[in-house]
Amino acid sequence: MTDISPLDQARILSEALPHMQQYDEETIVIKYGGHAMGDEATAKNFARDIVLLEQTAINPVVVHGGGPQIATMLKRLGIVSEFAAGLRITDAATIEIVEMVLAGSVNKQIVGYINEAGGKAVGLSGKDGNMVKASKTTRTIVDPGSNIEKAIDLGFVGDPEKVDLTLLNQLIGYELIPVLAPLATSQDGQTLNINADTFAGAVAGALKAKRLLLLTDVPGVLDKSKKLIPQLSVKDARKLIADGTISGGMIPKVETCIYALEQGVQGVVIIDGKMPHAVLLELFTNQGTGTLIHK
């Protein structure tokens, strides 16, 4: 970092004041995943930023993924995943590893980094306190040969149905930072893996969060000429999906944003998690950094 004069440092802090006031005592849900979780230095920076939020009377809730870490562990154990229509089928052997990696190593690593930075993180999954109940996900694919739609069973994969805030309400506002692994229980007690974006959207909606930040591997939503779109309404976002501007893996991300807004989140931001201090840039500067989607 270039040396900043003490005066400049003070000015920067002073300029953050109106932003801090805007989020005072508000809940911000931050989805942290993909390659944003990459190396140790990035993870430690992220943890410091989360502790800083908590110090400024913001209530951060972290939801994390762990796709790359799960893939590494499955490979190490020689468990071969089946795929259908590009989606991983999570069988009984796989869900055991998914839970071990998400609720175990990844969750506790993030908790460790936040605590090391001076925070008080509590690592949980959606199973704890019956926080998230989910139903099994089914997807239909059209068989290219016969053109008949058929349902595929993705195994132990779910969609959130109900969020119970009892446990989170015991933590939020008491200087504790919840760090959540995206696992939930089905009505019949099975463990289900939930897409981390979807899980974060459901939790943020239930908490009526002021912001949901989705830290991803891209700068945000790009227009046809690959320039960043700073703001979008839900109506605009739907148009851009319809005309193909928003495509591929960005479609489910934007659909999660729309779903979260419908659940009561005030604004959802898609930002590049690889950018240093992305969370602080978004919340505490005039510039912002990604794409804000609002009603």
Image: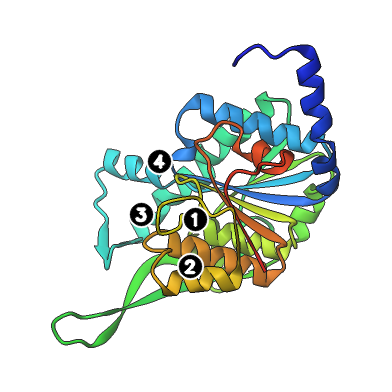
Specify few, some or many for label 2: CA neighbours under 10 Å numbering under 14, 14-19, or 20 or more.
Answer: many
Q: Position of residue 72 (x, y in %)?
A: 33, 40
N-terminal label among 1 and 4: 4
Numbered tag placed on residue 31 in the rendering: none
N-terminal label among 1 and 2: 2
Numbered tag placed on residue 158 in the rendering: 2
Please name which of the two marks, 1 or 3, marks the residue nearer to the observer.
1
Q: Residue at x 57, y 48 (%)?
A: 290
Check the image and report above or below for 137 versus 282. Answer: below
Q: Quadrant of the N terminus?
A: top right
Using the numbered discs, state the Cα–Cα distance from disc 2 to disc 4 in whole angstroms: 20 Å
Q: Position of residue 14 (x, y in %)?
A: 84, 29
Q: Quadrant of the C terminus?
A: bottom right
Callout 2: SS: strand
Q: Amino acid at mark 3?
A: Thr
Using the numbered discs, state the Cα–Cα distance from disc 3 to disc 4 in whole angstroms: 13 Å
- Residue reaching furthest to the left: 145
Callout 4: SS: helix
Callout 3: SS: helix
Using the numbered discs, state the Cα–Cα distance from disc 1 to disc 3 in whole angstroms: 32 Å
Q: Residue at x 76, y 19 (%)?
A: 8
Identify the residue under disc 1.
221
Numbered tag placed on residue 94 in the rendering: 3
- Is residue 63 or residue 234 the one in the foreground? 234
Specify few, some or many for label 3: CA neighbours under 10 Å numbering under 14, 14-19, or 20 or more.
Answer: many
Q: Residue at x 24, y 44 (%)?
A: 78
Residue 258 occupies which quadrant of the picture?
bottom right
N-terminal label among 3 and 4: 4
N-terminal label among 1 and 3: 3
Q: Amino acid at mark 2?
A: Gly
Q: Residue at x 66, y 41 (%)?
A: 287
Using the numbered discs, state the Cα–Cα distance from disc 1 to disc 4 in whole angstroms: 26 Å
